[in-house]
Amino acid sequence: MKALHLLPLFLALVLASTARADEDSDSLTGFYEAQFKAFPATPVPLKAKASLQWNPKARRYRTRIKQAWEEAKEPNFAGHFYAVENIGCGTGCLVIFVIDWNTGEIFSPPEDHFFAVHNNSRLMISKAYDSCTAYGPPILLEFTGKRFREVKHDRCK
């Protein structure tokens, strides 16, 4: 009987935490707008969308990558790259792949989690899982065109 009294409190906490997570994801890109601008994309002429060039990690997710690539209308990251979204790894995390529009080469950042990108910026903001919070602090990664370089990672205290 006492458990029924706690149900409304539990539901209120769950709804509040869900709303907070949505606020965090929406505010993440706005909060880091200046950082996106500090890493402008290098202009590169776009060619026709290339065939995918598979690597071992990407091959494990080929169905979802292929589907996302077929649906892609234009690059969404760093001028001529396409960041594939919404590939789950089966445990609540996300796997990230970045595809060069012109060559089809597939890259993976060092962190596989929720991320934000802009088409006119080389910066990727990843919210990595961390031992101190559910999502941990944001990690700012600069994509050089071949690899990701960590710009900033506020470690938990």
Image: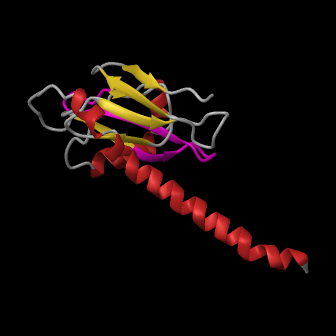
Q: Position of residue 23 (x, y in %)?
A: 45, 56
Q: Which residues are magenta?
A: 85-105
Residue furthest to the left in view is 45
Q: Position of residue 124 (x, y in %)?
A: 36, 33
Q: Position of residue 36 (x, y in %)?
A: 27, 34
Foreground pick, 91 / 37 = 37
Residue 122 highlighted magenta (yes or no): no
Name the residue: 50% across, 30% down.
Answer: 111
Identify the image quadrant of residue 53. top left
Foreground pick, 66 / 13 = 13
Q: Is residue 30 above or below residue 124?
A: below
Q: Is residue 128 left or right of residue 98?
A: right
Query: Total of numbered circles in the picture?
Result: 0
Name the residue: 72% across, 71% down.
Answer: 9
Q: Is residue 76 left or right of residue 116?
A: left
Residue furthest to the front in view is 157
Can residue 155 be seen? yes
